[in-house]
Amino acid sequence: MQKIIKYVVIDIMRNRTMIAYTILLLFVSFSVFNLEDNPEKGLLSLLYIILIIVPLISIVFATIYIYNASEFIELLLAQPIKRTTLLVSIFLGLSFSLLLSFLVGVGIPVLVFAGTTTGITLILTGFALTAIFVSLALLASVLTRDKAKGIGVSIMVWFYFALIYDGMLLFFLFQFSDYPIERPMIVLSALNPIDLGRILVLLKMDVAALLGYTGAVFRQFFGNSMGTIYSAGIMSLWIVIPFVIALRRFNRKDL
């Protein structure tokens, strides 16, 4: 397993796309903190950029990499290597590489300019979103053999979570505003990892006006500490569940 992880990490870190991703994050992070006098405002601006860029790059890059490495995967399966070991190794290799780029591009600037609890929470949220969307990329890649279709599915998954879901949530809120929908809103918020990441950081920042309805509901029911624990727990499930489904499909798949 270690050899496979090491090969995947080295292969990815030499990739021009990964280098460009790291430089982009580094440029955006330093630009945001240099433009803002208050580090908290810098973190807030950086948060909304991260919520768009990190999931998109993570899911699209991971999907493309898996399809491009299909011959390598088939070659390894011809060896006495368990499928579970192989998929776990690929997941860990992809996640580690993307997390390393995120750490260099965002983690270091955040620790330099705003090394507070909120800053650390932002870094951990970026880590979680990276792992979640790598897990979703694995699932998309396992579900279909067609590369174009797999990439299309990945982009649609990102588009749904990043843009469409909040609109649907607002529509639901508007339609049922006369009813006690606090508890359903908590459940619905848990179905979007990007929204959970936003709430997780904003709860730490204590910015009531920017929490939105879902964040206000989280604070009302759980308070700051419980809301953070709940969000972190659900995001952990978002990593595990898609990966387990992908693993079961991969183990049964005829290659």
Image (spheres, grey):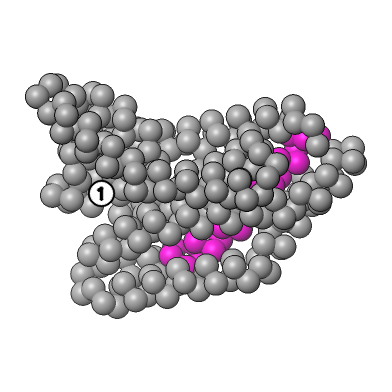
Task: Determine which quarter of the picture holds residue 112.
Answer: bottom left
- 97 drawn magenta: yes
Q: Is residue 71 left or right of residue 224?
A: right
**Rendered view: 34 above or below 120:** below
What is the tally of numbered marks visible in this picture?
A: 1
Residue range highlighted in magenta: 82-107
**Rendered view: 13 above or below 249:** below
The three-letter code of the residue at mark 1 reads Leu
**Rendered view: 220 above or below 77:** above
Quarter occupied by the N terminus: top right
Magenta span: predominant SS is helix
Q: Position of residue 22 (x, y in %)?
A: 52, 69
**Foreground residue among 155 and 195:** 155
**Foreground residue among 231 and 155:** 155
Residue at horizontal 23 percent and vertical 63 percent from the top: 40
Q: Position of residue 231 (x, y in %)?
A: 35, 37
Q: Is residue 32 left or right of residue 158?
A: left
